[in-house]
Amino acid sequence: MFEQLNKLYIGTNMKMYKTIQETKNFLRELSVYTEDIKSSDLELFVIPSYTALETARQMASSKRIKIGAQNMCWAENGQFTGEISPLMLKEVGVDLVMVGHSERRHIFDESDEEINKKVLSAIEHGFTALMCIGETQDDKIGGTSDETLRLQLKRGLQNVTKVQAPNLWIAYEPVWAIGESGKPASETYANTKHKVIKQCLNELFGESIGRQIPILYGGSVNNLNAPELAKMDNIDGLFIGRSAWNAKNFNQIIRHVLPLFQEKQE
Ligand code: PGA
């Protein structure tokens, strides 16, 4: 069994949903709901749309709630119309950058090579890089899920050094589990895949560093399955879409999950 991390990681990706005003309201509510929870127990993060980033940073100015960007160009500047650079995100005060979300890979055809450039650039610019990986339904049916996960890790994390690796978080989000048409992975299935990911990270960075990298499960997490997922040995946190976009509901999930996670550590 792998060693547990000492805090729970839980966050939400807002995708292309909330406006600036909606993000503001959400963060205001979430800050009040969660103000008694210590950051040493919970790493709470919110990844809003680009236009809402500056407001989100102001709303979460104490940094108790980390703010992330949904994507980033690897280059600092240049002829990259429509892209956002690491310097621009630094200026806004973003803490983390999500890279390689399933929708980026599958709708916008992002490759592991591009994802790798973004991961390296994010870390070099002082952000935490949250790299998302996950197998497709075809991989699952064909029995190649583990190979796909290992390939995405090895390609996406190429040239990340042992010194840089502690700035990584991994989100395991099976493509077939995400979104309205998704079916959540069972807790045992997710746990098995997290184990594969942990083993691969240990191979890449050595055990003492590999085990510091949190692995979050995402894909149709909801109030019912969140507690069961959080009890699993290899699951260090949850990455939630739809069920977290209402601050009250998000807080309910956090409240259910946090004590279970803490019990697991005892
Ligand atoms: P979902 O989204 O929880 O709405 O399935 C998860 C994600 O895409 O990160």
Image: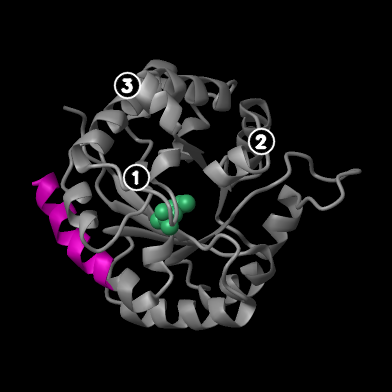
Residue type at the position of mark 3: Gln
* CB within 8 Å, label 3 to label 2: no
Is disc 3 placed on a helix, strand or loop? helix
- Residue 240: image x %, image y %? 39, 57
- Residue 7: image x %, image y %? 27, 51
- The magenta stretch is 252-266
Residue at 26% over, 66% down:
253
Give the labeled residue for mark 2.
110
Tag 3: Cα neighbours inside 10 Å, few (<14), some, or many (≥20)?
Answer: some
Residue at 75% over, 57% down:
88
Q: Earlier in the sequence, mark 1 or mark 2?
A: 2
Q: Is mark 1 within 8 Å of ligand 1?
A: no
- Residue 117: image x %, image y %? 68, 31
Give the labeled residue for mark 3.
199
Q: Is residue 44 above or below residue 136?
A: below
Q: Earlier in the sequence, mark 3 or mark 2?
A: 2
Instruction: Kindly report the secondary structure that dominates the magenta region of the rendered protein.
Output: helix
C-alpha separation, residue under disc 1 versus residue under disc 2: 21 Å
- Mark identifier at residue 217: 1
